[in-house]
């Protein structure tokens, strides 16, 4: 099997797993996987599709600036430019963007602070930080409607082959060296968000009773 096809299936499998979690509400979300580096090419989800369905039109191959690399009627994700920034600045192999209620709530609750900070959670080890007192900070950026502006702001928070940025009241974009790693990170972040929200609710109930 060619690398091109192998990566297509890898991304399709990740898409299926995230769909099983119901993380593609209302056609939201977009995914990408690197195919080449010299020059950069990657598979990216077609814009506006129901990402819970598995079809031959789910992904199209784009070049290093996000334009289709082959003749196609498919339109790359409206947010392809954010994936471009990841591959331009890092050796990352995969980028995942999902809208969940939890990541939207966290982005709104901590948006004015510009970041949300986690510490003292075992799941932080899934992000590659194994120290007992490891701290994880997720930047939160404004949801600019202008995608080049959003992509520039997003890019200012890319500092390595793995990372995550929350877009306020929009969603999260996570990247990693491989599709497996990016998915693992995404799941860990969503765990932390869900925990934090539930903790705040329980604490509030505890205080009022
Ligand atoms: C339908 S949600 C608005 C667009 C969006 O934020 C998104 O993630 C999906 O857009 P795409 O063009 O990638 O389908
Ligand atoms: Zn989005």
Image: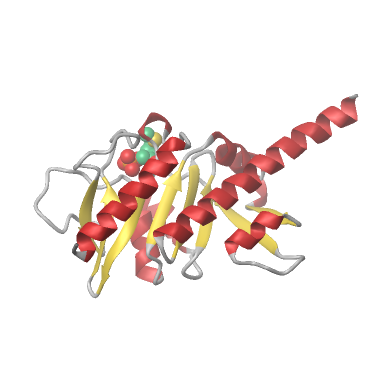
Closer to us: 126 or 209: 126
Quadrant for the C terminus in the image: top right
Position of residue 41 in the picture relative to residue 117 (left or right): left
Q: Position of residue 48 (x, y in %)?
A: 29, 36
Position of residue 160 in the picture relative to residue 86 (left or right): right
The answer to whether residue 119 shows anywhere in this view is: yes
Q: Residue at 57%, 41% (x, y): give it.
A: 103
Q: Position of residue 131 (x, y in %)?
A: 72, 69
Residue most extreme to the top: 209
Position of residue 46 in the picture relative to residue 197 (left or right): left
Quadrant for the N terminus in the image: bottom left
The answer to whether residue 23 shows anywhere in this view is: no
The structure's colour scheme is: secondary structure
Residue most extreme to the bottom: 38
Q: Residue at 63%, 44% (x, y): give it.
A: 193
Q: Position of residue 176 (x, y in %)?
A: 46, 63
Q: How many labels does the image show?
A: 0
Q: Residue at 72%, 55% (x, y): give it.
A: 121
Q: Position of residue 160 (x, y in %)?
A: 49, 70
Residue most extreme to the front: 1
Q: Quadrant of residue 68?
A: bottom left
Position of residue 147 in the picture relative to residue 109 (left or right): left
Q: In which quarter of the image is ligand 1?
A: top left
Closer to us: 104 or 45: 45
Up-down: is 25 above or below 95?
above
């Amino acid at each position: 099997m060619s690398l091109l096809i192998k990566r297509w299936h890898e991304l399709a499998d990740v898409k299926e797993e995230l769909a099983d979690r119901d993380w593609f509400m209302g056609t939201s979300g977009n995914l990408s996987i690197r195919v080449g580096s010299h020059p950069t090419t990657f598979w990216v989800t077609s814009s506006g599709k129901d990402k819970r369905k598995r079809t031959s039109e789910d992904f199209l191959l784009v070049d290093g600036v996000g334009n289709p690399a082959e003749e196609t009627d498919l339109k790359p994700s409206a947010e392809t430019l954010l994936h471009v920034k990841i591959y331009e600045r890092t050796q990352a192999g995969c980028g995942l963007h999902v809208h969940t209620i939890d990541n939207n709530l966290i982005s709104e609750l901590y948006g004015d602070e510009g970041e949300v900070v986690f510490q003292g959670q075992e799941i932080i080890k899934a992000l590659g930080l194994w120290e007992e007192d490891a701290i994880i900070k997720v930047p939160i950026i404004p949801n600019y409607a202008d995608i080049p502006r959003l992509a520039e702001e997003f890019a200012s928070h890319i500092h390595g082959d793995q990372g995550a940025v929350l877009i306020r009241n929009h969603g999260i974009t996570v990247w990693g060296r491989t599709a497996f790693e990016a998915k693992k990170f995404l799941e860990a972040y969503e765990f932390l968000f869900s925990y934090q929200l539930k903790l705040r609710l329980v604490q509030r109930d505890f205080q009022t009773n």
